[in-house]
Amino acid sequence: MSALRASRIQNLTWEVTIGGAKVYLTADIAEDGRCAGIWLQKHLRQSDAETRSWADLWALAFTKALRCGCSLDSLVDAYLFVRTDDGGVVQGDAQIKMATSIVDYVAKRLAIEFLGRDELANVRLPVERRREA
């Protein structure tokens, strides 16, 4: 068992709609406040089983990379502004209003939450409201 997995103490979940699809992003948080992994659940639209499968696999690969020593910074940079057909208007997030894909949304949300990269937010919140949003 990895040190990050053993030290996981809490998680944060965001429920958003991206381009009309309901998405739940959960980030595991290690004791030191770092992101220790993610879980991604996408609710199915009509014939969307393939997209749901890739989302599960991508989140697993992202988590494995974090736990094997890849920095969150480098993962975020790799996935920012990735464009797929599942992007669009984001509803349910106080800071992010548009994403080019689900992957782009995840990268932006994690960058804002864990790396302090407020420049990626469409709306900037006061410091005291950031963890609540």
Image (cartoon, grey):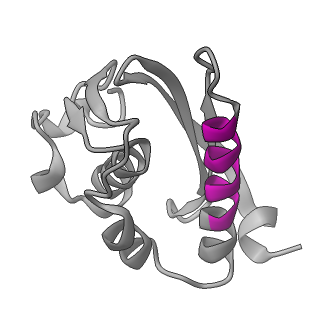
* Residue 70 showing in the rendered view: yes
Q: Is residue 74 magenta?
A: no
User: What percent of the width, then of the height, locates residue 56?
Assistant: 69, 47
Of residues 29 and 71, which is closer to you in this image? 71
The image quarter in which residue 18 lies = top left
Instruction: Relative to 19, say whether 126 is above or below.
Output: below
* Residue 96 showing in the rendered view: no
Residue at position x 37%, y 47% from top? 84
Instruction: Relative to 75, say whether 33 is above or below.
Output: above
User: What percent of the width, then of the height, locates residue 81?
Assistant: 25, 57
Image quadrant for the N terminus?
bottom right
Residue at position x 39%, y 17% from top? 20
Residue at position x 43%, y 72% from top? 75
> For this view, does 15 lie left or right of residue 10?
left
User: What percent of the width, then of the height, locates residue 115?
Assistant: 31, 63
Residue at position x 58%, y 17% from top? 45
Q: Is residue 58 magenta?
A: yes
Of residues 114 and 120, which is closer to you in this image? 120
Query: Which span is picked out in magenta?
Result: 50-61
